Amino acid sequence: TQALWAYIRENDLQNPEDKREILCDKLLSRVMGGQSRVTMFSMNKYITPHMLEKVDKSKYQHEEITKGEDESGSEEESD
């Protein structure tokens, strides 16, 4: 999405009267479902199908380190 915003800025595609609105040029319109204008908020529904598959984060479980434990899982010695 950073590259998309860079393209929008480089080509001056934000509506100067309403910065939330993007004025699509011919190339951007192809990505935005043929729309000539989109808002920052509606833009997501058009770009999502073009993004890489999202990773299922539930497969990556991390154990929490509780206070008093170091990263190895052993109790810290207190002075």
Image (cartoon, helix red, strand yellow):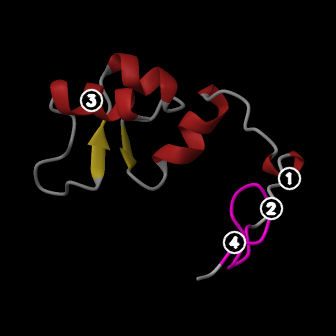
- In the image, residue 56 above or below residue 6: below
Q: Mark 3 and 4 residues: CB-CB less than 8 Å, in contact?
A: no
The residue singled out by tag 1 in the image is 58
Which label lies toward us, 2 or 4? Answer: 4
Instruction: Identify the mark at residue 6; answer none if there is no mark.
Output: 3
- Label 4: state its secondary structure: loop
Which label lies toward us, 2 or 3? Answer: 2
The residue singled out by tag 4 in the image is 76
The residue singled out by tag 2 in the image is 73
How far apart marks 2 and 4 lie (CA) works out to: 9 Å
Where's residue 55, x and y in %?
76, 38
Asked which quadrant contains residue 72, the reply is: bottom right
How far apart marks 3 and 4 lie (CA) works out to: 48 Å
- In the image, residue 25 above or below residue 54: above
- Label 3: state its secondary structure: helix
First reached walking from the N terminus: tag 1 or tag 2:
1
Magenta span: 65-77
Q: Is residue 76 left or right of residue 27?
A: right
Q: Is residue 66 magenta?
A: yes
Which label lies toward us, 3 or 4? Answer: 4
> Which amino acid, mark 2?
Gly
Q: Give the overall secondary structure of the magenta segment.
A: loop
Where's residue 18, x and y in %?
19, 57
